[in-house]
Every structure is written in C-alpha cells, then in structure tokens.
Amino acid sequence: MSNRILADTSFSQIINAPFERIDIAGWLFHLTNAEYRACCPPDHIACGRSTTEDGRLMSINVETIGDSLLVQQYVGEIAGPHHCRMVSLSDVFGPLGRTTSHVVWELKVEPFDATRSEYINHVTAVATDELLALLDGHGIAFEQAAAARAEAAAAHNARETPRFAHSIEQRALAHLGTPRPVL
C-alpha cells in the first residue's frame, strides 16, 4: 500500500504538563464537539464517539481537508494514555464525487522534561481501490491527486496540532491533584 499514500504528515507541539498527567485516550474520547471545532476552525465541523460492535472505542469526526468533506469513523487499535492509533475507512465527498480513503491517525505524547511533554500528531491517508477508480474515471493521475491531498493535509495538520496540544494540556492541568479518569 505504500505506493498508494495520498498524504503522510506529522507535526509536534510542546505541552506544558508533565508526561504522567497526560491521558490522550481520555481526552480524545471525552472531547466535546465545541472543543473539537475550536481545534481547527472552520475545517472541524463535528465530532462524536461510539463503539464498534465488538466494543472497541470509536471517534467520529467530520471535517474538511482541502476541497473535500470527510466523515471519519476512527476505531481505536491502540487507545492508551500516551499513544492512540486510530484507523478509519473514511467517506470522502469531493469535487469528483463520493469515494473512500483509508486514514491512520496516531496521537502520541513523549516526555520532554520534568514538567513538559511533546505531543505528536501523525496522519497517513492511503487511496482505496474505489478512490483509484474514481481518479482513473476522471483521467486524473494518482500523483497529481496525491500532491494536492498531501499539501492540504499538511496545512490542516499544522493548524490543528498546536490546538489539540493546548486542549490536551488544559485537560491534564485541570486534573492535577485528582486521579486520572477511568475510561
């Protein structure tokens, strides 16, 4: 699938909270719609949470990236306090019509020093057979579509990463002196 990568973007931001106080999964699965929208206006439209049929946590995000509207149903393959790996077969509504893409969203935090941590927001989008057929049907080279998506995804990630980090920081600081919430 490496020859199908549409975008692979990673940004990081320092969080002014100690590593042991950060709970990314707790933040992600308790993120309010208003907080999500504030993390990348006007791109972030709505978020919610659910579970899969087998009980795995799911984050549902609606956002625009470039000229496409995405409905992402991220399933938590890893959902821990310092690392979440969320995978979605996302619906994509764009100028060419409706299609899908496979998206992996990794949220990590690493210790920076005794009082600060580093948040890493990494997103990889991979073309599905359906997307490749749509591009082919419109005579658009994959490389052209991938270049446009990579540029839009990087710009989006650069805007949302510092705001996600700030939101995670606020949650960690609000919970100082209290036990970490249980999911």
Image: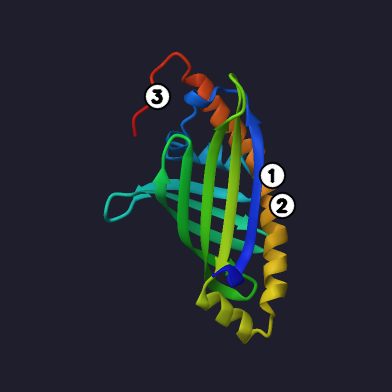
Question: Residue drawn at (72%, 52%), measured in percent from left and top?
Answer: 155
Give amino acid for label 2: Ala
Q: Which residue is mark 3?
A: 180
Q: Secondary structure at mark 1?
A: helix
Looking at the image, is mark 3 or mark 1 nearer the viewer? 3
Q: Are marks 1 and 2 in contact (CB under 8 Å)?
A: yes
Displayed quadrant of residue 150: bottom right
Q: Coloured how?
A: rainbow
Q: Residues within 10 Å of mark 3 (few under 14, many from 20)?
A: some
Q: Residue furthest left?
A: 54
Q: Residues within 10 Å of mark 2 (few under 14, many from 20)?
A: some
Q: From the viewer's perspective, is 99 left or right of 26?
A: right
Give amino acid for label 3: Arg
Q: CA distance from mark 1 to mark 2?
A: 6 Å
The tag on residue 49 is none
The tag on residue 159 is 1
Q: Decide which of 38, 120 is in the foreground and name it.
A: 120
Give amino acid for label 1: Arg
Image position, residue 123 (x, y; %): 58, 53
The tag on residue 155 is 2
Q: Is residue 173 above or below residue 126?
A: above
Question: Residue drawn at (28%, 49%), measured in percent from left and top?
Answer: 55
Looking at the image, is mark 2 or mark 3 nearer the viewer? 3
Question: Residue drawn at (53%, 43%), measured in percent from left and top?
Answer: 107
Question: Residue drawn at (69%, 53%), measured in percent from left and top?
Answer: 154
Q: Secondary structure at mark 2?
A: helix
